[in-house]
Image: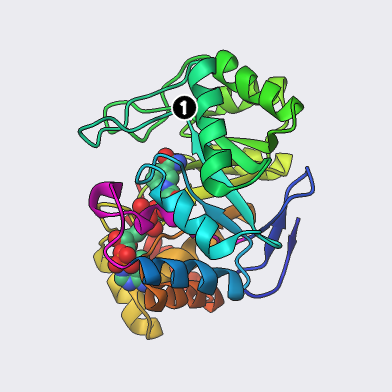
Amino acid sequence: MVTKNTLGGTFVSSQGIAFTRMGYGAMQLAGPRVWGPPADRDEAVRVLRAAVEAGVNHIDTADFYGPHTTNEIISEALAPYDGVSIVTKVGSVRDDNGGWPHARSPKELREQVESNLTTLGVEALDIVNLRVGGGPDGHSAVPGSLSEPFGALAELREQGKIKHLGVSVVDADQVAEARSIAPIVTVQNWYNVAHRGDEALIASLNEQGIAYTAFWPLGGFNPVQSGALDTVAERLGTTAKAVAIAWLLQRSPNIVVIPGTSKVAHLHENLAAAELELPEDALTELEDVGV
Ligand SMILES: NC(=O)c1ccc[n+]([C@@H]2O[C@H](COP(=O)([O-])OP(=O)(O)OC[C@H]3O[C@@H](n4cnc5c(N)ncnc54)[C@H](OP(=O)(O)O)[C@@H]3O)[C@@H](O)[C@H]2O)c1
């Protein structure tokens, strides 16, 4: 169900969780390559507070951003988190070279949940996504059972350390398997105007009342670039990034968007993109951008 207001409206999941369709992704608040402290910590705090002041009610993070740095900045900026859900993810850690090795044994997951509780300064985590996939590009679903790691998180939910669960970098079979173990409120995968592998999954999640959180709405480390985006943006008097965000919001009512930025000015530009209504001819033109 979607109710209209600013920020693209609100998607309410079948579990009753309300997501403003514009969220904020905090990965850009760590240092270069998501390692160490940011160049401007005060600006990072301002970005988070500005997002919440604008009405954003969910912030995406991970204790492996930094590691720990991003969660610590979130805690400094937003605790005690009135009205805002912090959505974290587990399933990886950082190694000494800045790598992101998988860490999905029940013991490792319990440690990561405890670390998130500490760095965010809470007694229970609002939403925890199990990050599952990887593959050659590092960010795509890899088929296989998630029952052991997801079962471990379901136990932590039963114990009250996690309020709600989600899954990330998964395929439809893994979503179904997770749902057979415990309810989920969101699926978080790589999806944007140029990367559309999840169309069928998004439609099916919409029918099931599950939010689809699109990461890399602007292309992440490889910014989305296309002549059609530029043409449409120029015609509408806006930017290609705003068009890319508006496209996501118009694509399906259960899509929520978590653009990342380290700058308050960019945050406001991104949130304003939710007000942009792409006309039919623009949507048609943008069909060719996707693969
Ligand atoms: N589940 C997963 O596996 C997974 C993987 C990747 C990301 N994520 C989540 O998804 C979120 C979004 O991903 P992301 O931050 O990597 O990529 P993104 O939102 O697609 O793009 C962020 C990049 O765009 C720039 N940018 C943002 N707004 C801009 C604007 N208005 N004008 C110009 N440049 C702008 C940012 O730089 P500036 O800082 O200069 O604005 C940054 O370089 C992350 O924060 C994270 O929470 C999840």
Expressed as whole percent of the image width and height from the top left, the position of residue 75 reads 54, 56
Task: Identify the residue at horizontal 58%, vertical 40% (top origin).
Answer: 117
Highlighted range, magenta: 21-40
Q: Is residue 84 left or right of residue 259?
A: right
Quarter of the image containing the N terminus? bottom right
Q: Residues within 10 Å of mark 1 (few under 14, many from 20)?
A: many
Q: Position of residue 47 (x, y in %)?
A: 45, 70
- From the viewer's perspective, tell me whether residue 273 is left or right of residue 83: left
Is 236 one of the magenta-colored residues? no
Residue 229 seen from this side: no
- Residue under the image location 50 percent in, 66 percent down: 48
Asked if residue 35 is among those painted magenta in the image, a careful observer would answer yes
Q: Nearer the viewer, residue 251 or 30?
A: 30
- Dividing the image into four quarters, tell me where ligand 1 lies: bottom left
The residue lying toward the viewer, choosing from 234 and 268, is 268
**Which residue does the numbered mark 1 point to in the structure image?**
132
| Residue occupying the far left of the picture | 97
Quarter of the view holding residue 31 = bottom left
Identify which residue, 121 or 218, lies in the foreground.
121
Q: Secondary structure at mark 1?
A: loop
